Image: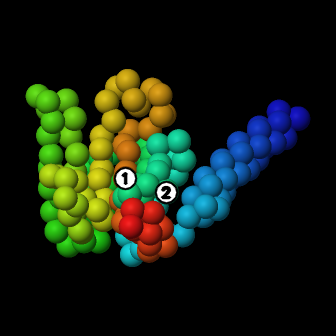
């Protein structure tokens, strides 16, 4: 009798883990392809609509991950075949690892690229993640046309 109970408990735990893994994969695949305009989405990340700005100039897609910044930077260094540019802001409190494909007119800001940002202790608790990944893309062509038509 005790053996059946242990087997049942093990089966429940196993299927719970499988279901969670499946839901995590579905969450990733549901709204996003594996890459955005040629930039791969980090596989072990989840999209955060609240932090993203898909209609902005530039468009910013924010993903959160439980992986360390070092492993995410290594993933993008392998993809881009260049080392990340490390930006450090006030007294080292904020670090950004940047892969700039197309620079914007604002200093140290990409119009197209990737930024990997290790979260501080406070933000880790809020977002329940270790690292924020920003995929930055230029506005869509139709948005550019609308804006120039309005300003003309």
52 or 31: nearer the eye? 52
147 or 23: nearer the eye? 147
What residue sits 47% from the left and 28% below the top? 126
**Residue found at the far right of this picture:** 1
Residue 96 in the figure: left or right of residue 4: left
Q: Quadrant of the C terminus?
A: bottom left
Q: Which residue does the numbered mark 1 point to in the structure image?
A: 134
What residue sits 52% from the left and 51% below the top? 47
Q: Which is nearer the N-term, disc 1 or disc 2? A: 2
Residue 143 in the figure: left or right of residue 17: left
Q: Quadrant of residue 25?
A: bottom right
Q: Position of residue 39 (x, y in %)?
A: 37, 70
Q: Position of residue 149 (x, y in %)?
A: 44, 69
Above-or-below relation of 23 to 145: above
Residue 67 in the figure: left or right of residue 3: left
- Residue 135 visible from this viewpoint: no
Q: CA distance from mark 1 to mark 2?
A: 15 Å
Which mark lies nearer to you, 1 or 2? 2
**Residue found at the far front of this picture:** 152
For disc 2, the neighbor class at 10 Å (few under 14, some 14 to 19, many from 20) is few
For disc 1, the neighbor class at 10 Å (few under 14, some 14 to 19, many from 20) is many
Q: Which residue does the numbered mark 2 point to in the structure image?
A: 55
Q: Quadrant of residue 2?
A: top right
Above-or-below relation of 79 to 15: below
Above-or-below relation of 129 to 62: above
Q: Position of residue 82 (x, y in %)?
A: 16, 68
């Amino acid at each position: 009798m005790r053996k059946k109970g242990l087997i049942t408990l093990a089966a429940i735990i196993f299927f719970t883990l499988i279901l969670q893994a499946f839901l995590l994969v579905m969450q990733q695949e549901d709204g996003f392809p594996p890459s955005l305009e040629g930039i791969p989405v980090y596989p072990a990340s989840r999209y955060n609509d609240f932090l993203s700005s898909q209609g902005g100039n530039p468009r910013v897609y924010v993903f959160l991950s439980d992986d360390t910044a070092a492993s995410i930077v290594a993933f993008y260094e392998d993809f881009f075949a260049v080392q990340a540019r490390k930006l450090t802001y006030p007294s080292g409190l904020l670090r950004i690892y940047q892969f700039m494909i197309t620079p914007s007119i604002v200093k140290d800001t990409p119009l197209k690229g990737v930024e990997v940002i290790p979260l501080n202790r406070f933000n880790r608790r809020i977002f329940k993640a270790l690292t924020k990944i920003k995929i930055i893309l230029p506005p869509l062509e139709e948005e550019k046309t609308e804006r120039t038509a309005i300003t003309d």
